[in-house]
Amino acid sequence: MANNNLMVGLEIGTSKICVVVGEGRTDGTLKILGVGQAPSRGVRKGEIVDFETAMKCVHEAVVDAEQKSDVMIRSVYVAVAGSHLQSFNNRGCVILPEDRDEIDEQDVEDVKINAREVSIPAQNAFLHSLIQHYHVDGQEGVLSPAGMFGQKLEADFHIIHGVRTRIQNTIRCVKELPLDVEDVVFSGLASAQVVLTQHQKDLGALVIDMGGGTTDYVLYADGAVRQSGCLAVGGDHITNDISMGLRIPMARAEKLKIEEGSCILGNCLPGEMILLKDDSGFAGKEIERETLNTIIYLRLREALELLKRRLDEETYLNYVGAGIFITGGCSLLNGIDHLASEIFELPAYLAHAQSTSGITSAVENPQFATVIGLVKFAQVMHSDRPPRGLGRIFGKLLGGMR
């Protein structure tokens, strides 16, 4: 991996481990060179619960990616998720000394530090400080204050933090392989990097990334992140409901959900049945299609209404002009966009990675939005001018693992 244009993303998900090798192009696009996967074990609701088992699964996915991309992987960008992640908005302020009236890069860094001088739980660590807007002597909407004249620099940030040890467990799982961890990134933020265009962020957009064990969300208004978080509910909960409700094994419930499931009610013939063939240890049976769809509908509706209540704690949903963009494995469920549109009273769309080329099956599969987003994040970090809102502030987390 001597090529500086090569970057690797790693997502330790609840259902699967994904590794994507990407190559940054001079025009700002990405080419996907290889995708490695392995079933995920030892992970629950986006967090590692069995260290050794999870580490073996990560190793399998890395080896798979190396073979498919013909690249020796040395370092990765890693996604983190989990309901322990929290966020808030805060303003930092720096007053320049009387003998100086030109804002420099240190002032810009100081105002970010100042914004983080707030009380968070003792066990938590800062993950991201995402710039929203700068203000110079009351002038709003300043994009780059360094070099401007002024006496008072203020900045609004969206700050994401989480339980330090849980984040470190993910880092350690990778470093034990051994691989270097270049950065850790909130999964929802990674997905948004490739799912949304800058224009959609400016108009206001909500990204919902629903995976196996978690649902990540990121809300943009006026081009900046205003709300974000992670709910401990996902596709596995639907599968569990199907298994319990229809009294069938989990593996059959998952297959049934993927191949036959829908969250649209009243759209099938009365009494329409689905035949489940017998299998080793399972006697075949018939399932009423509307019953299956009702189970899926109720669980999905509950999850989306929970998310809406979380977002309604602030007013930013009123500024979502571009609509809702749903990605992740659960977005493949028939009708989820219609259900989301009904609940949020906003246009909703199914979304996958944009501005990428290479392996079409990976680019167009919403299950890979997060891990491709990690590679896009890496590309941004490698460029000379990182865009607003992306910054590396987790050095202490990595430092503790060295």
Image (cartoon, rainbow, N blue to C red):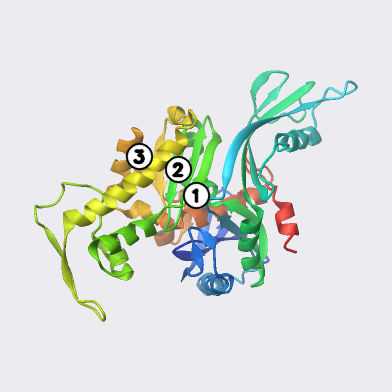
Q: Is residue 387 left or right of residue 97?
A: left
Relative image position of residue 334 (x, y in whole percent): 27, 51
> Callout 1, which amino acid?
Ser
Residue under pointer 3:
348
Among all residues in the image, which is located at the extreme top?
A: 138
Q: Is residue 253 left or right of residue 115?
A: left
Determine whether label 1 and label 2 are within 8 Å by CB. Answer: yes
From the image, which quarter does the C terminus lie in?
bottom right
Asked if one can make out residue 261 in the rendered structure from this viewpoint, the answer is: yes
Label 2: which secondary element: strand
Residue at image position (54%, 46%) is 189
Label 1: which secondary element: helix
> Callout 2, which amino acid?
Val
Residue under pointer 2:
207
Specify which label sits upstream in the sequence, 1 or 2. Answer: 1
In the picture shown, does residue 182 fall above or below 220?
A: below
Relative image position of residue 62 (x, y in whole percent): 55, 71
Q: Between 370 and 16, which is closer to the camera in this rendering?
A: 16
> Callout 3, which amino acid?
Ala
Residue under pointer 1:
191
Q: Between 8 and 314, which is closer to the camera in this rendering?
A: 314
Label 3: which secondary element: strand
Distance of mark 3 from mark 2, alpha carbons? Answer: 10 Å
Distance of mark 3 from mark 1, alpha carbons? Answer: 16 Å
From the image, which quarter does the N terminus lie in?
bottom right
Among all residues in the image, which is located at the extreme right?
A: 99
Residue at image position (46%, 46%) is 195
**How would you rate the neighbour count of disc 3 (Cα within 10 Å): few for under 14, some for 14-19, many for 20 or more?**
many
